[in-house]
Image (spheres, coloured by chain):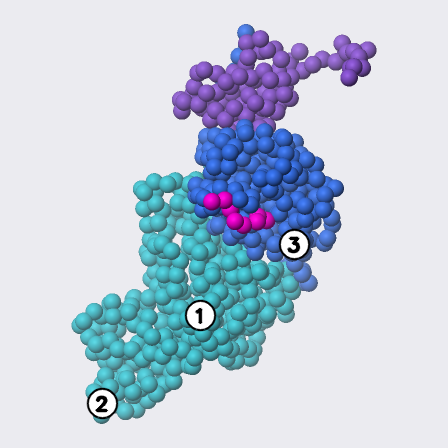
Amino acid sequence: MRDVVFAEAHPLDRIIRSDRMPHIWCPGCGIGIAMRCYAHAILNSEIEEQNQVVVSGIGCSGRVAGYMNIDSYHTTHGRAIPFAVGLKLSNPALNVTVFSGDGDLAAIGGNHLIHGARRNLDLTVICTNNFNYGMTGGQSGPTTPYNARTTTSPYGSPELPFNLVDLLAAAGANFVSRWTVLHVRQVIDDILYAFGKPGFSFIEILSPCPVGFGKSNNFETGIEEMRLYRERCEMGEHMPLSELGIDLRAERPIYIGRFIDRNAPPFKPVHLGPAA
Amino acid sequence: MSETGILTGSHFMNGDHACAEGAIAAGCRLFGGYPITPSTEVAERLARRLPQVGGVFIQMEDEMASIAAVLGASAAGSRAMTATSGPGFSLMMENLGLAIMMELPCLIVNIQRGSPSTGLPTLPGQSDIMQARWGSHGDYRLAAYSPWSPQEIFDLTIHGFNVADRYRIPVLLMADEVVGHMVERVVIPEAAEIPFWDRKRANGKAGETFHPFEPGEDLVPPFAHAGEGYRVHFTGLTHDTRGYPDMSAEMHQQLVRRLVDKVERNSAKLEMSDDYEVEDANILVLSYGSTARSARRAVREARELGIKAGALRLISIWPFPEQAFNALADQMDAFIVAEVNLGQMITEVERRVRTSKPVSGVHHAGGAMLPPGPILEEIKRVAGHA
Amino acid sequence: MQVFARIPVNLERFQIPRGIVYLILERCKGCNLCVELCPQQILEVSPETNEKGYHYPQLKAQSDRHCVNCEFCAMVCPEFAIYTVEEPQ
């Protein structure tokens, strides 16, 4: 009877900093899956790895930059996008990806998120949305579902969360999609698509956070949240954007899919004279 | 205009514009900023000039984004700067710390205005001096220069970029509204005469085991830019020489100690000052920026009254011009510090003089250039002059 | 509902791929996503644990030959711990 063969190395070790594995994310956390999709996309992209750059902010997802074996920058909370803007403007040949979380991108970084989308600079933004601030132990954030419990909303969050898809669509991004870490093939496809798409691309990836969020909102483990995704997710490309908000309370579906795919002109700084 | 965009020749321009031209001359190719009086003219000038030299101007959504974009550009290899004033300067403090930790050279120009808070947007102040030194959280050192003329802000912008690139630190220009808005002659030299200190670059083979934070003799690590194939990791977290996060107290001591020593050990090369009538002086008036013009006038008038006063102008406010001060201190009987705030740089003088000799201040909270009168009065009082 | 499926006429021409399952033991954190989500349902939780005490996946006794190298376990593993390689026919 053959069994699992114990190995020393993983096929993706070349593109991740395997000397820093195992990483810090909790058992059942989905960030590792999302990062794997990103790594997979890099390996399957024609873009030279030398030009692949990742910028992360602060939070659990903020640690992605530290695990990617490419030029990587782990910046301050909320400021990954403007830092990425600087990188891209200084060297347009770079394919700059911002990989961060819901709190980092949509709360403290919200102003940069909407202006980044408005400006429509050529960036790919991957947002792992696990509905809370996981790194600091499970506080409520800009996407925490209404009435969900967290350490800072012990009686249920009294706030309505962002509908990130609608927000990014309104702000002007050229590409907006939402998946979960269960939909790994779609995520990989969209990251590759975003790499090739001029302008601002935003990919929201719902991701379990059993320790920070799931435990206090009756899906204790990563598996349970994955089951929730499996039961509740529906393709929502036909839905009006305003309907794409996530409400874990009611039996409403979680709409996923590609929602925005347009070609507004990406931000190009003015150049008059010959390059100095 | 030469294709390097350097406007060689003699001009009549305000300090803000001179700063912008200094940036162009220094090879700055990205400005990320946000409008704020009295620094907006720096941005306006560069919005027009950078596209002419293949550079990038971007007005960001706020000052936090501005400094972040500057740091990103620096990490990718560009000389990059921002210009702001008090309120924006405060918003940049966190990423100033990121510049320290990631050792990303950049220039931050603060055309100071009456502060605190919204204060006097269109009027001068020099009250961000200690913020320039201690504004971000944690122990760190940097260089900050205070120009007193459009010509000097032009020169110090070039020097600031050179210092930033050589030591991989943020450099601050602490001007004030008077210097920013006054119009004077600015002579711009030939391109060949503009000093350019390049960054110490990582020149190993990409992919080799290269530690992006392995310091050299001068404690400055060779710089690997994004896109050069070194697969670098830069983080605001305490990190080891590979750039990998390391949360141990020992690594923190080692890293922060180096970041501080990197500047302190080289401070002699960073210090800048000039003096006036100090040869036989026994009263030393210290000042910086536009105030130094009034101090020089007051010293001249005191001399006419037979008082042996002299002036030391701090061009580098951080690091404090230790050598110049020590060379003069012994011969002095008293020290006077003139500054447009309620007493900031004076504490640095007091710290050095301690109780051996009197140290007094000529202070004003802001809103106007400090005139010579009050400084002369203080010189006369200290000299015991009727 | 009666199933109208039928055996494709050229069925034997298609080789169903075989996969060998590899695991980097010390990276596994026992999240069981691979076990849960394997489309062939051929994995199960081992009674053994790695150094950190996490129960890692193992092949079920009777289905050790049923991995079709779809790589889904590798794709949903957050730890870069498990992967499959096609077994040469």
x, y percent for residue A227: 59, 29
Q: Are marks 2 and 1 in contact (CB under 8 Å)?
A: no
Q: Place residue A179 in its image quadrant.
A: top right
Q: Are marks 2 and 3 in contact (CB under 8 Å)?
A: no
Residue tagged by mark 3?
Answer: A171
Residue B142 on the magenta segment:
no
x, y percent for residue B354: 21, 69
The magenta stretch spans which residues? A155-162
Between the C-alphas of marks 2 and 1, the distance is 39 Å
Residue tagged by mark 2?
Answer: B385
Query: Around disc 2, counting alpha carbons within 10 Å, would you say few (fewer than 14), some (14 to 19), or many (20 or more)?
Result: few
What color does chain B have in the rendering?
cyan
Residue A161 on the magenta segment:
yes
Q: Classify A270 as above or below B177.
A: above
Q: Place residue C37 in its image quadrant.
A: top right
User: Is label 2 or label 3 in front?
Assistant: 3
Residue found 54% across the figure and 29% down from its top: A224
At label 2, the amino acid type is His
Between the C-alphas of marks 2 and 3, the distance is 69 Å
Q: Which chain is purple?
A: C
Residue tagged by mark 1?
Answer: B117
Query: Label 2 marks which chain's residue?
Result: B
Mark 3 on the same chain as mark 1: no
Q: Is residue A228 left or right of residue B343?
A: right
Q: Classify C4 as above or below B201.
A: above
The secondary structure type at the circle numbered 1 is loop
